[in-house]
Image (cartoon, rainbow, N blue to C red):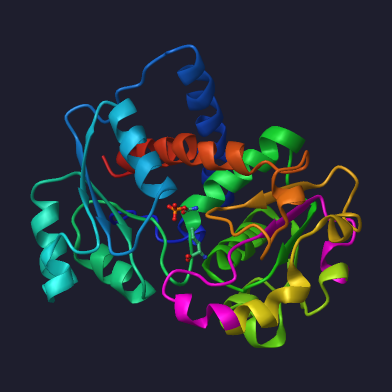
Amino acid sequence: MGLRHFLSLNDLSAAELKRIIDRAMVLKSDRQIRKLCDVMKGRVAVLVFEKNSTRTRISFECGITQLGGNAVFMGPTESHLSRGESIEDTAQVISRMADLVVMRTGAHERIENMANSALVPVINGLTDFNHPCQLLADLQTYIEYRGDIKGITAAWLGDGNNVCHSWMNAARILDFQLNIATPPGFRPNQSLSELCRSNVMITDDPFLAVKNAQVVITDTWASMGQENERLERNMAFKPYCVDSSLMQYAHKNALFMHCLPAYRGQEVTTEVIDGPQSVVFPEAENRLHAQKALMEFLLHVND
Ligand code: CP
Ligand code: NVA
Protein backbone atom coordinates (compact mmCIF):
# COMPACT_ATOMS: atom_id res chain seq x y z
CA MET A 1 0.00 0.00 0.00
CA GLY A 2 1.27 3.54 -0.79
CA LEU A 3 1.81 6.38 1.63
CA ARG A 4 -1.22 6.86 3.88
CA HIS A 5 -2.57 10.32 4.66
CA PHE A 6 -5.52 11.53 6.74
CA LEU A 7 -7.51 13.90 4.56
CA SER A 8 -10.90 12.47 5.46
CA LEU A 9 -12.40 9.97 7.89
CA ASN A 10 -12.90 7.83 4.78
CA ASP A 11 -9.12 7.25 4.75
CA LEU A 12 -9.67 4.90 7.73
CA SER A 13 -11.57 1.64 8.06
CA ALA A 14 -14.09 1.37 10.89
CA ALA A 15 -11.64 -0.86 12.77
CA GLU A 16 -8.80 1.66 12.38
CA LEU A 17 -11.02 4.52 13.49
CA LYS A 18 -12.05 2.60 16.62
CA ARG A 19 -8.42 1.67 17.29
CA ILE A 20 -7.36 5.34 17.14
CA ILE A 21 -10.16 6.37 19.51
CA ASP A 22 -9.29 3.57 21.96
CA ARG A 23 -5.65 4.61 21.85
CA ALA A 24 -6.63 8.27 22.40
CA MET A 25 -8.36 7.23 25.63
CA VAL A 26 -5.25 5.38 26.79
CA LEU A 27 -3.02 8.36 25.95
CA LYS A 28 -5.44 10.56 27.89
CA SER A 29 -5.25 8.44 31.04
CA ASP A 30 -1.47 8.02 30.63
CA ARG A 31 -1.11 11.79 30.63
CA GLN A 32 -3.03 11.98 33.92
CA ILE A 33 -0.44 9.70 35.55
CA ARG A 34 2.43 11.40 33.69
CA LYS A 35 3.27 8.27 31.74
CA LEU A 36 5.16 9.39 28.65
CA CYS A 37 5.21 8.06 25.10
CA ASP A 38 7.98 9.36 22.85
CA VAL A 39 6.94 7.97 19.49
CA MET A 40 7.88 11.29 17.83
CA LYS A 41 11.33 11.56 19.38
CA GLY A 42 13.69 12.97 16.74
CA ARG A 43 10.77 13.71 14.42
CA VAL A 44 9.48 17.03 13.16
CA ALA A 45 5.98 18.00 12.02
CA VAL A 46 5.35 21.08 9.91
CA LEU A 47 2.03 22.85 10.45
CA VAL A 48 1.00 24.74 7.30
CA PHE A 49 -1.97 26.89 8.31
CA GLU A 50 -3.58 29.08 5.66
CA LYS A 51 -6.42 29.93 8.07
CA ASN A 52 -6.45 30.95 11.72
CA SER A 53 -6.78 28.48 14.57
CA THR A 54 -6.78 28.21 18.34
CA ARG A 55 -7.57 24.56 19.15
CA THR A 56 -6.06 22.80 16.15
CA ARG A 57 -2.76 24.63 16.39
CA ILE A 58 -2.45 24.29 20.16
CA SER A 59 -3.51 20.64 20.25
CA PHE A 60 -1.08 19.66 17.50
CA GLU A 61 1.82 21.67 18.94
CA CYS A 62 1.22 20.35 22.47
CA GLY A 63 0.65 16.80 21.21
CA ILE A 64 3.82 16.74 19.11
CA THR A 65 5.86 18.06 22.05
CA GLN A 66 4.29 15.53 24.43
CA LEU A 67 5.20 12.73 22.01
CA GLY A 68 8.84 13.88 22.07
CA GLY A 69 8.85 15.62 18.67
CA ASN A 70 9.07 19.18 17.44
CA ALA A 71 6.55 21.32 15.58
CA VAL A 72 7.31 24.07 13.06
CA PHE A 73 4.32 26.39 12.58
CA MET A 74 3.74 28.44 9.44
CA GLY A 75 0.75 30.77 9.68
CA PRO A 76 -1.35 32.28 6.89
CA THR A 77 1.16 34.96 5.90
CA GLU A 78 4.43 33.35 6.94
CA SER A 79 5.35 31.01 4.12
CA HIS A 80 5.77 31.69 0.42
CA LEU A 81 2.44 29.96 -0.22
CA SER A 82 0.81 33.33 0.47
CA ARG A 83 2.98 34.83 -2.30
CA GLY A 84 2.08 32.15 -4.83
CA GLU A 85 4.73 29.43 -4.39
CA SER A 86 3.07 26.21 -5.47
CA ILE A 87 1.76 23.62 -3.04
CA GLU A 88 3.66 20.98 -5.01
CA ASP A 89 7.05 22.70 -4.53
CA THR A 90 6.26 23.37 -0.86
CA ALA A 91 5.40 19.68 -0.35
CA GLN A 92 8.70 18.58 -1.93
CA VAL A 93 10.72 20.89 0.29
CA ILE A 94 8.93 19.94 3.54
CA SER A 95 9.23 16.23 2.72
CA ARG A 96 13.02 16.47 2.57
CA MET A 97 13.23 17.91 6.09
CA ALA A 98 10.24 16.85 8.15
CA ASP A 99 8.31 13.68 8.99
CA LEU A 100 4.69 14.86 8.94
CA VAL A 101 2.57 17.71 7.60
CA VAL A 102 -0.57 19.15 9.17
CA MET A 103 -2.37 21.48 6.80
CA ARG A 104 -5.32 23.84 7.29
CA THR A 105 -6.55 25.46 4.12
CA GLY A 106 -9.62 26.57 2.13
CA ALA A 107 -10.22 24.61 -1.07
CA HIS A 108 -9.98 20.88 -0.37
CA GLU A 109 -8.06 20.48 -3.62
CA ARG A 110 -5.12 22.29 -2.01
CA ILE A 111 -4.67 19.60 0.63
CA GLU A 112 -5.11 16.89 -2.00
CA ASN A 113 -2.30 18.53 -3.98
CA MET A 114 -0.15 18.62 -0.84
CA ALA A 115 -0.78 14.91 -0.21
CA ASN A 116 -0.13 13.99 -3.85
CA SER A 117 3.27 15.70 -3.82
CA ALA A 118 4.39 14.96 -0.24
CA LEU A 119 6.64 12.03 0.64
CA VAL A 120 5.49 12.14 4.28
CA PRO A 121 1.97 11.73 5.73
CA VAL A 122 -0.37 14.72 5.49
CA ILE A 123 -3.08 15.39 8.08
CA ASN A 124 -6.11 17.56 7.35
CA GLY A 125 -6.41 20.26 10.02
CA LEU A 126 -9.61 21.59 8.31
CA THR A 127 -10.58 22.52 4.79
CA ASP A 128 -13.75 24.14 3.48
CA PHE A 129 -14.97 20.60 2.77
CA ASN A 130 -14.28 18.70 5.98
CA HIS A 131 -12.66 18.62 9.42
CA PRO A 132 -11.83 14.99 10.21
CA CYS A 133 -9.58 15.66 13.23
CA GLN A 134 -12.54 17.35 14.91
CA LEU A 135 -14.53 14.14 14.50
CA LEU A 136 -11.85 11.99 16.11
CA ALA A 137 -12.28 14.14 19.23
CA ASP A 138 -16.07 14.31 18.96
CA LEU A 139 -16.40 10.54 18.65
CA GLN A 140 -13.99 10.02 21.53
CA THR A 141 -16.06 12.41 23.65
CA TYR A 142 -19.37 10.74 22.86
CA ILE A 143 -17.93 7.28 23.62
CA GLU A 144 -16.36 8.47 26.88
CA TYR A 145 -19.67 9.85 28.11
CA ARG A 146 -22.15 7.37 26.70
CA GLY A 147 -20.36 4.25 25.36
CA ASP A 148 -20.89 2.72 21.92
CA ILE A 149 -22.05 5.16 19.25
CA LYS A 150 -23.38 2.50 16.85
CA GLY A 151 -27.14 2.80 16.38
CA ILE A 152 -27.59 6.10 18.21
CA THR A 153 -29.32 9.15 16.76
CA ALA A 154 -27.28 12.36 16.44
CA ALA A 155 -28.70 15.70 15.32
CA TRP A 156 -26.83 18.42 13.43
CA LEU A 157 -28.38 21.90 13.42
CA GLY A 158 -27.43 24.85 11.24
CA ASP A 159 -25.01 25.00 8.33
CA GLY A 160 -24.28 21.94 6.17
CA ASN A 161 -20.59 22.78 6.42
CA ASN A 162 -17.16 21.14 6.79
CA VAL A 163 -17.78 19.78 10.30
CA CYS A 164 -21.23 18.54 9.25
CA HIS A 165 -19.60 16.68 6.34
CA SER A 166 -17.23 14.90 8.71
CA TRP A 167 -20.15 13.94 10.97
CA MET A 168 -21.83 12.45 7.88
CA ASN A 169 -18.75 10.33 7.17
CA ALA A 170 -18.64 9.24 10.80
CA ALA A 171 -22.31 8.19 10.70
CA ARG A 172 -21.67 6.02 7.64
CA ILE A 173 -18.46 4.43 8.95
CA LEU A 174 -19.67 3.74 12.50
CA ASP A 175 -23.30 3.11 11.54
CA PHE A 176 -25.36 5.62 13.49
CA GLN A 177 -28.19 7.88 12.37
CA LEU A 178 -27.44 11.56 11.71
CA ASN A 179 -30.41 13.92 11.32
CA ILE A 180 -29.40 17.22 9.74
CA ALA A 181 -31.61 20.31 9.92
CA THR A 182 -30.52 23.21 7.72
CA PRO A 183 -32.30 26.00 5.87
CA PRO A 184 -32.94 24.81 2.29
CA GLY A 185 -30.09 26.81 0.72
CA PHE A 186 -27.46 25.53 3.15
CA ARG A 187 -27.66 21.78 2.80
CA PRO A 188 -24.55 19.60 2.84
CA ASN A 189 -22.69 18.49 -0.29
CA GLN A 190 -24.98 16.47 -2.57
CA SER A 191 -22.63 13.65 -3.53
CA LEU A 192 -21.60 13.15 0.08
CA SER A 193 -25.29 13.07 1.02
CA GLU A 194 -25.76 10.32 -1.60
CA LEU A 195 -22.80 8.34 -0.27
CA CYS A 196 -24.13 8.55 3.31
CA ARG A 197 -27.84 8.26 2.51
CA SER A 198 -28.39 5.09 4.57
CA ASN A 199 -27.31 6.91 7.72
CA VAL A 200 -28.29 10.53 7.06
CA MET A 201 -31.67 12.28 7.01
CA ILE A 202 -31.82 15.91 5.85
CA THR A 203 -34.71 18.18 6.76
CA ASP A 204 -35.43 21.86 7.25
CA ASP A 205 -37.31 21.11 10.49
CA PRO A 206 -35.07 21.51 13.56
CA PHE A 207 -37.60 19.82 15.88
CA LEU A 208 -37.84 16.75 13.66
CA ALA A 209 -34.04 16.48 13.54
CA VAL A 210 -33.52 16.62 17.31
CA LYS A 211 -36.42 14.32 18.24
CA ASN A 212 -34.98 11.77 20.71
CA ALA A 213 -31.40 12.53 19.61
CA GLN A 214 -28.68 11.39 22.01
CA VAL A 215 -26.36 14.17 20.91
CA VAL A 216 -27.16 17.59 19.47
CA ILE A 217 -24.40 19.34 17.54
CA THR A 218 -24.05 22.75 15.96
CA ASP A 219 -21.33 25.07 14.65
CA THR A 220 -20.93 28.71 13.71
CA TRP A 221 -23.32 29.94 11.04
CA ALA A 222 -20.49 31.76 9.22
CA SER A 223 -17.35 29.69 8.77
CA MET A 224 -13.92 31.18 8.16
CA GLY A 225 -14.06 33.01 4.84
CA GLN A 226 -17.83 33.68 5.13
CA GLU A 227 -17.62 36.55 7.62
CA ASN A 228 -19.08 39.04 5.15
CA GLU A 229 -22.21 36.86 4.80
CA ARG A 230 -22.83 36.90 8.54
CA LEU A 231 -25.89 39.22 8.53
CA GLU A 232 -27.69 37.29 5.81
CA ARG A 233 -26.77 33.97 7.42
CA ASN A 234 -27.94 35.09 10.87
CA MET A 235 -31.39 35.71 9.38
CA ALA A 236 -31.57 32.39 7.52
CA PHE A 237 -30.32 30.30 10.45
CA LYS A 238 -32.31 31.93 13.27
CA PRO A 239 -34.82 29.03 13.60
CA TYR A 240 -31.89 26.61 14.02
CA CYS A 241 -30.47 28.14 17.22
CA VAL A 242 -29.92 25.40 19.80
CA ASP A 243 -31.80 26.69 22.83
CA SER A 244 -33.35 25.01 25.87
CA SER A 245 -36.74 24.54 24.24
CA LEU A 246 -35.16 22.71 21.28
CA MET A 247 -33.07 20.58 23.65
CA GLN A 248 -36.34 19.47 25.32
CA TYR A 249 -37.20 17.52 22.16
CA ALA A 250 -33.94 15.57 22.32
CA HIS A 251 -33.40 12.50 24.52
CA LYS A 252 -33.42 13.50 28.20
CA ASN A 253 -29.74 12.51 28.54
CA ALA A 254 -28.69 14.20 25.29
CA LEU A 255 -25.24 15.73 25.11
CA PHE A 256 -24.55 19.07 23.44
CA MET A 257 -21.43 19.41 21.26
CA HIS A 258 -19.81 22.27 19.36
CA CYS A 259 -16.36 22.27 17.77
CA LEU A 260 -15.77 25.88 18.89
CA PRO A 261 -15.28 28.78 18.42
CA ALA A 262 -18.90 29.43 19.44
CA TYR A 263 -21.01 32.54 19.09
CA ARG A 264 -23.30 32.58 22.12
CA GLY A 265 -26.74 33.94 21.32
CA GLN A 266 -26.48 32.92 17.67
CA GLU A 267 -26.13 29.19 16.91
CA VAL A 268 -26.47 28.28 20.60
CA THR A 269 -27.75 30.01 23.71
CA THR A 270 -25.49 30.63 26.71
CA GLU A 271 -27.86 28.50 28.77
CA VAL A 272 -27.22 25.43 26.59
CA ILE A 273 -23.49 25.76 25.87
CA ASP A 274 -22.71 26.56 29.51
CA GLY A 275 -25.33 24.16 30.86
CA PRO A 276 -25.15 20.61 32.24
CA GLN A 277 -25.64 18.81 28.90
CA SER A 278 -22.73 20.59 27.22
CA VAL A 279 -19.41 18.74 26.78
CA VAL A 280 -17.70 21.35 24.62
CA PHE A 281 -14.56 21.69 26.75
CA PRO A 282 -13.86 17.95 27.18
CA GLU A 283 -14.51 17.82 23.42
CA ALA A 284 -11.87 20.52 22.83
CA GLU A 285 -9.42 18.75 25.16
CA ASN A 286 -9.89 15.50 23.26
CA ARG A 287 -8.42 17.13 20.15
CA LEU A 288 -5.08 16.70 21.93
CA HIS A 289 -5.45 13.02 22.77
CA ALA A 290 -7.14 11.98 19.52
CA GLN A 291 -4.54 13.66 17.32
CA LYS A 292 -1.68 12.15 19.31
CA ALA A 293 -3.22 8.74 18.61
CA LEU A 294 -3.67 9.67 14.95
CA MET A 295 -0.04 10.78 14.54
CA GLU A 296 1.20 7.62 16.24
CA PHE A 297 -1.00 5.55 13.91
CA LEU A 298 0.15 7.32 10.73
CA LEU A 299 3.83 7.13 11.66
CA HIS A 300 3.39 3.44 12.45
CA VAL A 301 1.51 2.45 9.25
CA ASN A 302 3.92 4.43 7.09
CA ASP A 303 7.13 3.15 8.76
N1 CP B 1 -12.46 23.41 16.42
C1 CP B 1 -11.39 23.93 15.82
O1 CP B 1 -10.83 23.38 14.86
O2 CP B 1 -10.96 25.09 16.37
P1 CP B 1 -9.83 26.05 15.82
O3 CP B 1 -10.35 26.72 14.58
O4 CP B 1 -9.58 27.01 16.95
O5 CP B 1 -8.61 25.25 15.50
N1 NVA C 1 -17.02 25.54 10.34
C1 NVA C 1 -15.99 26.27 11.05
C2 NVA C 1 -15.20 25.34 11.90
C3 NVA C 1 -14.16 26.00 12.73
C4 NVA C 1 -13.37 25.02 13.55
C5 NVA C 1 -15.09 26.99 10.06
O1 NVA C 1 -14.75 26.38 9.03
O2 NVA C 1 -14.73 28.13 10.31
Magenta span of residues: 208-231
**Residue 41 within the magenta-colored segment of the rendering:** no
**Residue 121 versus residue 178 in the image, above or below:** above
Left or right: 116, with 267 as reference point: left
Q: Nearer the viewer, residue 38 or 253?
A: 253
Residue 170 point in image, percent of width and height: 61, 57
Give residue 189's quadrant in the image.
bottom right
Q: Nearer the viewer, residue 267 or 200?
A: 267
Residue 34 point in image, percent of width and height: 43, 13
Q: Nearer the viewer, residue 62 or 133?
A: 62
Q: Residue at x 65, y 88 (%)?
A: 185
Give residue 248's quadrant in the image.
bottom right
Q: Quadrant of the C terminus?
A: top left
Question: Would you say residue 292 is visible in this rendering?
Answer: yes
Q: Residue at x 56, y 71 (%)?
A: 161
Q: Quadrant of the N terminus?
A: bottom left
Residue 142 point in image, percent of width and height: 68, 42
Left or right: 251, with 106 as reference point: right
Residue 293 point in image, percent of width and height: 44, 36
**Residue 128 versus residue 247 in the image, above or below:** below
Question: Would you say residue 190 is visible in this rendering?
Answer: no
**Residue 210 within the magenta-colored segment of the rendering:** yes
